[in-house]
Amino acid sequence: METTPQILEVKEVTMRFGGIVALDGLNLSLRAGELRCILGPNGCGKTTLFNVLTGALRPTSGTVSFQGAMISGKSPAAIARLGISRKFQVPGIYPELSVIENIALPLAAANRHPGVWSLLRQRPDRARIAELMGFAGLSQKGHVTAAELSHGEKQKLEVMMLLATDADLLLLDEPTAGMSKGETSAIAALIRKLTSELGKTVLVIEHDMNFVRELDCPVTVMARGTVIADGSYDEVRHDPRVIECYLGRAA
Amino acid sequence: MTRRLPLFLTIGIWVLLLLAPLALDDWRISQLAQFLTYGLFALSLAFIWGQAGILCFGQAIFFGIGAYLMALITLGKLPLLGESQWTGIILGAVGGGVGAFGLALFMLGGRGLSGAHLAIVTLCAAVVAEVAAQRWDFIGGFNGLLGVPPLVAPYTRDDMFLSSNETYFLVLAIVMAVYLLLLLISRSSFGTLLAAIRSNENRTRYFGFDVTVAKLFAFSLAGMISGLAGALFTAQFGFVSPPLVGFGLSTEVLIWVAVGGREVLLAAFVGAIFVRWVENLLSDKLGQYWLLAMGLMFIFVVILAPRGLFGRILNLSKSR
Amino acid sequence: MELVLTIGLDALSFVLTLLLVTLGLVIVYGMMNVINMAHGELFLLGAYTLVAAQSAGLPFWAGVLLAMLVVGLAGLLIEELVIRHVYGRPIDTILATWGLSIAIKQLIIIVFGPAAISLTNPLPGSVSVLGIDYPAYRLVIMAVSAFLAATVYLVLFRTSIGLQIRSVIANRGMAGSLGVNTRLMDRGTFAVGAALAGIAGAVMAPIMSVDPQMGVGFLIPAFLAVLVGGLNSLLGAVIGAGIIGGASTTLSSGMAQATAQICVFVIAIVVIRLFPNGLSKGFR
């Protein structure tokens, strides 16, 4: 039986800021098409990990490779062009622009070679934009300024923007932050569709335990810059190291 | 009807401009042609500021480069390049573009300067450019160059000057061409990229775009258009001097664009013509008070009407 | 050797005055994230207040004091009428204060006329310093500037109100939630920053030819000093003023003033390019 290839390999990555060790010899690998959650208390290094993966930070030591190629040390734009897209905790949308323009922008980068000359000759792909707006239930709001959307709509818009980039690996940083329970379920369903129907590989950072349970996917738990447990949600919940780490918090 | 108002107004304005020679006498048409040149200058700043979000306090540097090149060439001071006005106009534009490219390369290279720092550096550059122009004798020093010949008709054999109407139509044709070009660019994916850079530059990098190259391109294009405007200016006014590269003119064009409406190209264009026209009307009566009024008007617009006077009614895009 | 000493003293006097102007800019930026493009015109206002005071027959030092009060008050007005409305919008603040600088300059031209005015030197004659004859008044300028700069630093680093000010510069939100009255601080520091520029203008006026373009003449070096030294740093103000002021004076002694200006600009932008956050923040 052929094993699915590892799309992402993080090997012994350490990230130091002066005296602070944010990531400590972290190892992580993802198979193509996998959906994985990363859990951990505040300050355990989850966001730093995302920063390293997207090129915002260059790891002090260790390597990151994506689809076989080394990406640690590359610029954010170069890494994005290779097919990694990130959703930020605070919605990374363009508040002054309309919904259509918001989606049109990452769409223009979907061909992976968004140079000035090719962008000048391109017009936004109206059909694809309409399709994506449909996915997110925003079809009636094309010309609305993004700042006027509700919080949940903004989050969905940003997920659509990530889809527009046609990236293979999507990094979602606390996608349910600020959402109501109903919105949370909707986002969970959307994220599950990303892997099951669209074949994307998705890595999610989360805090909301109910949401993690709904996603029903493998979980990696981090603490103090390194991985302390790996497995399904139920396995990890009963892991003594994880309990110790979360001592004082309701599981 | 109100939803289509901007489109009607836009078309209406161009039609009016095309028909203007029927209603205006020679002197007024010349004046309008000069206003069109200012409008062209305003278009260049509106593009870089309103579309790309880069505030430049020294846009006149590139206008002045174009003006000086045009003067130097048509006065025969650069024999290697000949004396043709078309060379002057083209090289004026190219010179403006090269100057802008150089300055942008410097400011945006490495980690790049932030918006506020960049604005200050362009201000200092404009002051220094004027000082440098005053000291450079070859280009006329403090007094600049006078006696620049007006535009010549290429289709007569006696090198006859273009009439007022012909000059007007030539300038109008250039202005319309540039306007359409900028409009097309703003409708393309590159235009979307510039809007994204203006809105949230850092986020845009994470989508895979080379933001620095995009800004370089936009800045250079704006510089080219400024240079083109400068070349046309010199041919119409017949002179060039150091204040044309300095911060005084740079500030004036900022005011025109802010008052007109920086986010909408035609609004900025109309803003330039409007402010200039009002200045002509009132400066005799107001004298020194005119500049004071301008300063106060500028503050007013910045605080209370950031879209400018004409931004909303001329906005062709369906959102906002 | 005499020449070196003279240039050195000239440089010191320019640096100290530039420091006063720069300090005002840095403090206001640090406190309120406001880049005040009208700062040069506050310097100008100070000079012209002295002109007005002298033509009204007031003694020199009364004129300087008046300049401090008038410009400080102007600062309060500006903060209340303009700055407050564009708070949080840095680019709009630059634009609004730029409009203000145009308006103030034009107001001065209307009231005093565009021509340059010469003031009488309140302390003519020279004094023997380190073996050379140096104009006495320039030494006074240096003393006043040094005294004021030192006072500012002492207040900021040795008093409790200075601590409050520095806490707001360091972290506005935090300071506010700890009970610091940030609004009052804003008004106060803007007024003080303005007053500093006003005093600098008044004190410099007798040795410069006072004309409406003076403001920009000091604003540009002050901006370069701030960018070179570091926008948010008091130490940076000293470093920046030192470099820009020193380079300016030294180069001006050897070449035409205009060429010196260009060279200083080139030096400044090279430094800014290598150290985008200023020298006080280190290499990037």
Image (cartoon, grey):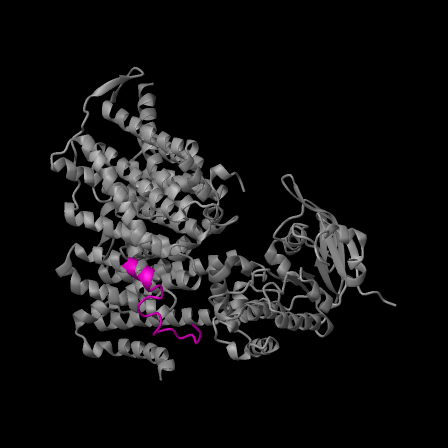
List the single residue furthest toward the bottom. B1
* Percent x, y of residue C72: 27, 42
List the single residue furthest toward the top. C131
Q: Is residue B299 magenta?
A: yes
Rendered-image quadrant of the N terminus of chain A: bottom right
* Percent x, y of residue A209: 70, 62
How many numbered circles does the render carry?
0
Residue B226 in sight from this viewpoint: yes
Q: Is residue C189 left or right of residue A74?
A: left
Compare residues B171 and A150 and report the one nearer the observer: A150
Q: Which residue lies at the image location 16% right of the left edge and 74% below the top edge?
A: B25
The answer to which image quadrant residue B175 occupies is: bottom left
Compare residues C273 and C254 and report the one nearer the observer: C273
Q: Which residue lies at the image location 25% right of the left edge and 42% below the top edge?
A: C71
* Percent x, y of residue B98: 42, 55
Is residue C137 depicted above or below B292 in this figure? above
* Percent x, y of residue A65: 72, 55
The answer to which image quadrant residue C147 occupies is: top left
Is residue C143 depicted above or below C264 in this figure? above
List the single residue furthest toward the right. A1
Q: Is residue B121 magenta?
A: no
The answer to which image quadrant residue C226 occupies is: top left
Compare residues B49 and C147 and report the one nearer the observer: C147
Give the overall secondary structure of the magenta segment: loop
Residue B95 in sight from this viewpoint: no
Is residue C114 depicted above or below A33 in this figure? above
Rendered-image quadrant of the C terminus of chain A: bottom right
Q: Which residue lies at the image location 15% right of the left edge and 47% below the top edge?
A: C111
Compare residues A66 and B309 and report the one nearer the observer: B309
Span of residues in magenta: B298-320
Q: Is residue A75 left or right of residue C282?
A: right
